[in-house]
Amino acid sequence: MSPVFFGLGILLLVMQTTVFHLLPSWLGRPDLLFLLVIFIVLYFETGPGLILTLLLGMLVDIFSGIHLGVHALAYFLLFVIIRIMARNLAIHDSVHQVPLVVISFLATTSFIHLLVSLLAPENPVLWDWPLLLQNVIILGIICLPFFHLCRRLMNRLQQRPRILLSSLRPRPRNRFRV
C-alpha cells in the first residue's frame, strides 16, 4: 500500500511543479502533496506513515531546490504533533479535518519560511499573502473530497488479495511412476 501512495505523492509533486504553474495564477496552486501528507499522518500506521512522510518531504526539497531536509523536518514535526493531538481529539471526523488542514498548512508554511530565512539570510523569503490565503481556501475546500478519494484507494488496496512471494516460485513437476 505504501508504494502506491509514494507513487501518488510523486505524481502530485510533478503536477504541482509543472502543470499547476502553467495555469493562471488567479486559479491558485494548491499544495496537493501536503493534503496527501496529512492523509498519511491521519490514516497510516506509525512506522510506514513516518517513513513515507519523510521520503515525500525529501522529494519536495529535491524538487524545490532549497536546503535539503527542510520540508522533511517540517513534515516530521507535523507528523509528531498531529499524532500527539490524535490521542486526545477526534480529528478523524470530517468536521475536524478542514480546520486541521488549514491550521497545519499555515503552521508548516510559516515554519518552512522561518527556517529557510534563517539558513539563507542573504536570500529574503517574501510572504505572498494573497497567494497563501488563496491556497488555504482551496485546500480547505478540496481536502474532504481528496481524503474521500484517498480512503477509497486505501480500502481498494486493502481488499485486493496479496500476492505472496512463495506463490511466485516455480512448482516442482509432477512425476508419476508407471
Image (spheres, rainbow, N blue to C red):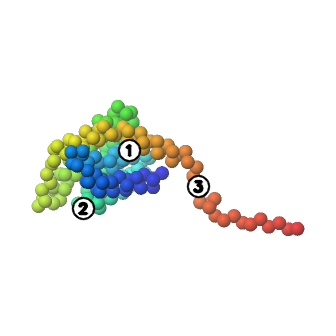
- What secondary structure is found at the residue carrying circle 2? loop
The answer to which of 87 and 27 lies nearer the viewer is: 27
Which of disc 3 and disc 2 is earlier in sequence? 2
Instruction: Classify mark 2: residues with Cα within 10 Å, few (<14), some (14-19) or many (20+).
Output: few
* Quadrant of image for the C terminus: bottom right
Above-or-below relation of 32 to 60: above
Answer with left or right where residue 103 lies relative to residue 150: left
| Residue marked by disc 2 | 65
| Residue marked by disc 3 | 163
The Cα atoms of the two marked residues, 2 and 1, are separated by 25 Å
- What secondary structure is found at the residue carrying circle 1? helix
Dots 2, 1 in contact, CB < 8 A: no
The answer to which of 25 and 140 lies nearer the viewer is: 25
- Residue 4's mark? none
- Residue 39's mark? 1
Q: Position of residue 32 (x, y in %)?
A: 32, 48
Residue sitting at 74 percent across and 66 percent down? 173
Which of disc 1 and disc 2 is earlier in sequence? 1
Residue 57 visible (yes or no) = no
Residue sitting at 33 percent across and 54 percent down? 15
Above-or-below relation of 126 to 94: below
**Furthest-top residue in view?**
95
Answer with left or right where residue 24 lies relative to residue 44: left
